[in-house]
Image (tube, grey):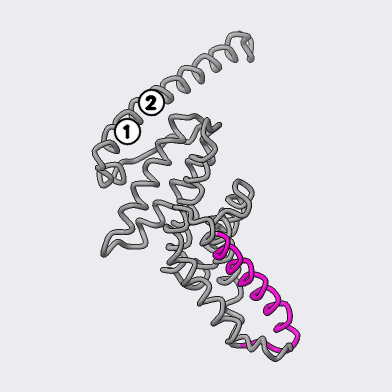
Amino acid sequence: MPLYSSEAPLKAIVVSLFLILMLAGCASMQLNRFQAHADRNDYQWIADQQVTCRQASESCGWLHLLKGDACLRLAGAAGASANRYACAADELAMGLTLTPSWSDPAERQRFQEKLCEAMLRLQDLQSGETAEKTLARLKDAAEALYRLAPGSLSAVYYLASVRLLQVQPDLLDLNAARRVPVCHRLKRTLNKVLSTMESARQSDSRQWERYAQNYQRLAFDLGSAVRMAECYKMQ
């Protein structure tokens, strides 16, 4: 009997194809259940489900996106723990990675915004090395959002938030050499935030209503960082 039968590779391909189709079918059935619960705003049920698929497909991608969205909604509730934000960040990231294409670019942008929001809130609840790793993930997500929607309210907000978080650990121990690049970065970021706020106010966009309070807080925090860094010493 030959060691390598010509039938063996074919059988392996058939088995693999069968498994792929079976998994795709399972994902589609699970997605139907998710959508039914989403229509009823039953986010708790969705968040509690296990999503095990890891293959790039529309069904699998949307399963992760819907679970991530559900976790993010629940995380905003009173008493929610960091676990919900971690669930949202992980599931949204997985869903965005596995979704092969988007018929609506605006929908792709909305889920990228949700990912940035989940990571920003999660990082705020963390400390030490864990917070640093989440900040690195947030930076990647914010930069991806900016590539999708350059200059948009959401992209500027999350990218500016990253810039502030990156310099905050150094503010209390700045020497003259470090003060120059830190202050330049803070001032550029603050000016970008302020100019974006002014443009948004003039356009009176509905999206500005969503971001107004966050922008005001961010502008205040950036101004505080400029003062804490004693940037006036550069003048």
> Magenta includes 177?
yes
In-image side of 33 versus 182 (left or right): left
Q: Please give the residue where the numbered disc 2 appears in the rendered image.
A: 28
Q: For residue 35, which numbered disc appears in the image?
A: 1
Q: Residue at x 41, y 21 (%)?
A: 22
The C terminus is located in which quarter?
bottom right
Under tag 1, what secondary structure? Answer: helix
Q: Quadrant of residue 64?
A: top left
Dot 1, crowdedness within 10 Å: few (<14), some or many (≥20)? some
- Residue 198: horizontal and vertical position, in percent? 56, 65
The answer to which of marks 2 and 1 sits earlier in the sequence is 2
Q: Residue at x 33, y 52 (%)?
A: 73
Amino acid marked by disc 2: Ser
- Residue 9: horizontal and vertical position, in percent? 60, 15
In-image side of 143 versus 107 (left or right): right
Q: For residue 57, which numbered disc appears in the image?
A: none
Q: Residue at x 49, y 67 (%)?
A: 215
Q: Is residue 58 above or below residue 113?
A: above
User: Where does the magenta region start and end?
Assistant: 173-199
> Magenta includes 28?
no
Q: Residue at x 43, y 46 (%)?
A: 91
Q: Is residue 57 above or below residue 69?
A: above
